[in-house]
Amino acid sequence: MDIKYYKFIVKGNDKVGGVLYAPENWPYPIARDGEEVKNWQSLTVELKDGKYRPFHLCVGGANMVNEELRDLLLTFIGNDDDIEFLPVRATSEEYGCKTYYIMHFKKIFDVIDTENTIYVEGTDTILKLKLDYKKVGHLNVFNSQPAINDVIVSDEVRKSIKKNRLDLGLDFMPVYCSEHE
């Protein structure tokens, strides 16, 4: 039986949502999973080319969520200290200022089914990810590799995001998980 999880995919051509930008001189990336985020307290990002969305991939290298999406995710994360939400100021001439949160994984979760994941031959670059059910069965929000835009959620989280209409500009790509006997 295949169990589904979903990877966040930001709609790049969505006319509804804008894009958050870090200052040009800000060190890239803003946040790298598994490493401490430096100097985030002084970061201000700017919204351009559209409205605020619940989830942004910030130009500058960070996953950013608004307060509503952060609160929803926290209900599924519970007391997981491996995920943190760091508040930063977002500005927009047209839509005003808001608080956004860098969604940061303090570690890379060990969730990959290495036997069934398809890699680029001779490398560890993943072509098709397969999750190991024994490793993800208790997780609702996690990552799988040290990529900046690697956010994976359970079907329950995906349904809740859609039900609460926090999916503006966001698609969900299925990531399969084989249940092993």
Image (cartoon, rainbow, N blue to C red):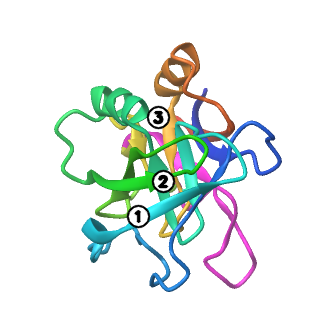
Which residue is pictured at 74% across the width and 45% down the height? 11
Dot 3: few (<14), some (14–19), or many (≥20) neighbours within 10 Å?
A: few
Residue 23 visible to an observer of this rendering: yes
| In the foreground, 52 or 131 | 52
Q: Position of residue 138 (x, y in %)?
A: 33, 34
Q: Earlier in the sequence, mark 1 or mark 3?
A: 1
Marks 1 and 3 close (CB-CB < 8 Å): no
Q: Which residue is mark 3?
A: 181
Placement of the N terminus among the 4 image quadrants? top right
Q: Position of residue 163 (x, y in %)?
A: 55, 13
- C-alpha gap between disc 2 and disc 1: 7 Å
Residue 107 found in image quarter = bottom left
Q: Amino acid at mark 3?
A: Glu
Report the span colored magenta.
Answer: 113-134
Q: Secondary structure at mark 2?
A: strand
- C-alpha gap between disc 3 and disc 2: 51 Å
Quick check: 51 left or right of 37?
Answer: right
Q: Earlier in the sequence, mark 3 or mark 2?
A: 2
Q: Which residue is mark 2?
A: 91
Residue 127 falls inside the magenta stretch? yes
Mark identifier at residue 44: 1
